[in-house]
Image (cartoon, helix red, strand yellow):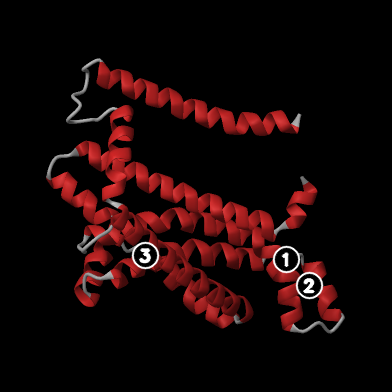
Amino acid sequence: MRKWENIGDKTIPLLFIFIILVFWQLIVDGGIIARYILPSPYDVVVVCIKIIPDIKEHIWTTLQEALIGLVVAIALSVILAVLMDNFTLLKKAIQPLLVVSQTIPVMVLAPLFAMWFGFDMLPKIMVVILVCFFPIVVNLLEGLNSLDQDLLNLMKSMKASRWHIFSLAKFPASLGSFFSGLKIAATYSIIGAVIGEWMGGKSGLGVYMTRVRQSFALDKVFASILIIIVLSLLLFEIIELIQYLAMPWRRAIK
């Protein structure tokens, strides 16, 4: 029964997407919307395959910015979450600042980073760090606080050190929440890099999209969006695989 439920969970969204694409294709083929305004899914796929050899440098630049920013965001998030979990005063001081940092539009900060740090990779990486940092640190902190209080009291009664409590109980218990935040951050990382590239740069999918949009080549714009979606889903699946390997007890439960 569970097997059929899993198949249904995967089939339903795929079927829904297929219906949307078919409807989209029919609208364009029927002439209801002109192709120069809205390219059909078939046109987008054909153009995407055609331009990939020419934009490999742009794809690689965006991927580099996203991966570097994501790795730095993970490192900073883990350090800050552990410190906030151990020091209540620090948590009370920093938590409001974390929330405030997410109220500032990225589209406002991205050009400022470009003016301050130039048009190389650094400002794009900083945008990725900014968009990825919050979901990771918040989810990890929530996971660290989710440890069963009875287990925590038991370990304290057995004179367990803070390191033993963290490594043997708190961190394993927080992995589910940590990976949930990481999946969100992974999907944000690519679009964060693209937003940074919109503000200026030498290469990257954001730079390429700006150029083709100014040339009114909307099929190439949609092809770029398709590549961004594929890269985001690829990162998401990699995180899922890492979670699968890092949490063997979840496989045992299933």
Q: Are the two marked residues, 2 and 1, in contact with CB atoms closer than 8 angstroms?
A: yes
Image location of residue 65, percent across then percent down? 36, 64
Secondary structure state at the residue bearing disc 1? loop
Question: Which of marks 2 and 3 precedes in the sequence?
Answer: 3
For the residue pair 119 and 111, the one nearer the viewer reads as 119
Q: How many marks?
A: 3
Residue at which label 2 appears: 152
Quarter assignment of residue 12: top right
Dot 1, crowdedness within 10 Å: few (<14), some or many (≥20)?
A: some
Q: Of the residues tagged 1 and 3, which is closer to the observer?
A: 3
Q: Residues within 10 Å of mark 2 (few under 14, many from 20)?
A: some
Q: Which residue is mark 1?
A: 147
Q: Does residue 87 appear in this view? A: yes
Q: Taking 178 as reference, is 124 left or right? A: left
Q: CA distance from mark 2 to mark 1?
A: 7 Å
Q: Quadrant of the C terminus?
A: top right
Is residue 146 visible to us here? no
Please, what secondary structure does the residue beneath circle 3 have?
helix
- Real-space Cα separation, disc 1 to disc 3, in angstroms: 35 Å
Badge 3 local density, few (<14 within 10 Å), some, or many (20+)?
Answer: many
Q: Quadrant of residue 245?
A: bottom right
Tag 3: residue type?
Answer: Glu
Q: Which residue is mark 3?
A: 65
42 shown above or below 125: above
Tag 1: residue type?
Answer: Leu
Asked if marks 3 and 2 touch (Cβ < 8 Å), the reply is no
Q: Residue furthest left?
A: 215
